[in-house]
Image (cartoon, coloured by chain):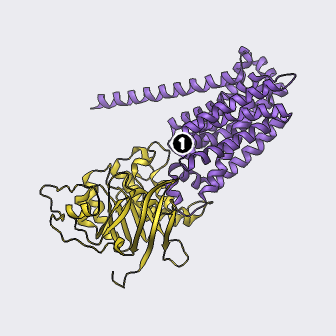
Chain colours: A purple, B yellow
Amino acid sequence: MVDAIIEFFSYGFVRNAIIASALISILVGFIGTYVVSRRLVFLSGGITHASFGGIGIAWYLGWNPLLGAAIFSIVSAVGIEYLTGEKRLREDSAIGMLWALGMALGVFFVFLTPGYAPDLMSYLFGNILTISTSDNLMLLVLSLVTALFFTLFYYPILFLSFDEEYVKTQHVKARVINFTLKILVALAIVLSIRAIGIILVISLLTIPANIANLFTKRFGNIIWLSALICFGSTILGIILSYRLNVPSGATIVIALALIYLLTRFYFHLKGAIFRDSLRKGL
Amino acid sequence: MSNEHSRIVEIRNVTAGYGRDVVLKNVSLDIYDDDFIGIIGPNGGGKTTFLKLLIGQVKPFSGEVSYSTSGKQLPIGYLPQAGMLDKNFPITVMEVVLSGLLSQKGLTGRYSKAQRQLANDYLRKTGIEALKHRPIGELSGGQLQRTLLCRALISEPKLLILDEPNTYVDTNFEGELYEILKELNQRMAIIIVSHDLGTITSYVKTIACINRTLFYHKSNQLSTELLAAYNCPIQIIAHGPVPHTVLLEHEHHADNNLTE
């Protein structure tokens, strides 16, 4: 068993997967905390699925699919804000429409493309064991930029997420920060697609931050704790998927969900024991 | 208006709203540095839009809002409706109060010791210093309003705007709040939106009724006839034995801004 694990970690693709896990976890720490506390989960889901349209069109034109996905996700992130900004359209409706349109465009163009069709499953569910060194380089740049941005603008990001209307009374450049945050969310989603897939990206953005939020009620602490939780469960997911020969993405999501349920159960028990000891003490 | 008090905001014939919807029409009002204006009016009449116009979040379709602060931004303290905030948001009392100093601190960097001390002073004055490290989700309605009041005051504003600060709070805090506001009015102009007509009229100096447009009543005494004349569909509720200043018979003042 131990030998098998040592052998497992000696493979190049495994090392790449572990580096990708670490980098994605850094992104998840910052972006997931932001998305969860500002309640942008549905918006993020919309951006993720809209990006599939970009993948399909890029495939049809012979471009790099990630480039297409990046353009589509950024345009939809900014587009949703534009469409709903003047109350021309309900935000959740705008997201729902873009969500479906993106998926439809993706499938449409992939099927229009003559010759070999790409492995749709790998875009929909991802595979962290196929991450390449160039994928990791892009992840490295994005996680550095994200970490730097959140460190520099920690307080405005926190305050904008809590009460945007109030921050706007403070004569600060709230729009620029909001705009940059949307782009970072879109890019973090696109670069995570290879690892975990369009359908499962949302799990990384939501579950680690929600687990961390059970332990701490402070924004800054949720960031690093959710990054750690994400890293731990991705590694666990990689090992399990190798041992059981099952898809890595699905395994990671199930691991995260189990950790969330166990943590909730732990706090539930702890609360019950605490109340019990109070009753006995009285 | 007496000459010793200076005008800080001038609103001239403003029409404003969202998208293509006009919410406010032909609003004119001068705000002086010692004003204490109570804003009343029906729901959907445009009270919140008017406040957003003042803090610059809603831009006028036509007309003008100008601040007499010689090039500098008028420091405004704003206390939004607490019901609009996400109580589950992971933020502490201290952080909320410090957000009132964001423009002083600038976008990057940390808060100085002096700024944290200042926040502490305000928390002590409002009696919630012990709660400073609590997440806001653990606060009562009154404690949250105190936190938001500290945030609005910490930048030493010249104009304090409060949007229904007396909802979600106990009557204890409400009375205390009005006393605090009375004292603050020595240093700054105050505009307060309230549903509670009976209480508001005994503290404010003047009353503005907003219902699609603004009717300014340069006194704190209202009558049913007056409200009818202003087309202000608000009922005057008299509170039992509590002394109040709502008068049933009252001379009609024609000196509101619209008659200009």
B246 up-or-down from A45: above or below: below
Give how far across and how far down residue B82 sits, in percent.
40, 50
Nearer-the-camera pick, B240 or B143:
B240
Counting from the top left corner in percent of width and height, residue A74 is at 70, 43
**SS class, disc 1:** helix
Q: Residue at x 53, y 79 (%)?
A: B70
Residue B156 seen: no
For the point 58% across and 62% down, the residue is A172
In the picture, the quarter occupied by the N terminus of chain B is bottom left
Image quarter in which the C terminus of chain B is found: bottom left
- From the viewer's perspective, tell me whether residue A217 is left or right of residue A144: left
Residue B9 vertical position relative to residue B90 in the rendered view, above or below: below
Is residue B127 among the parts visible in the rendering?
yes
Query: Residue A66, position in %: x, y?
Result: 78, 36
- Chain under numbered label 1: A
**Alpha-carbon neighbours of circle 1 within 10 Å: few (<14), some, or many (≥20)?**
many
Q: Nearer the viewer, residue B142 or A108?
A: A108
**In the foreground, A277 or B66:** B66
Q: Which residue is mark 1?
A: A37
**Amino acid identity at mark 1:** Ser
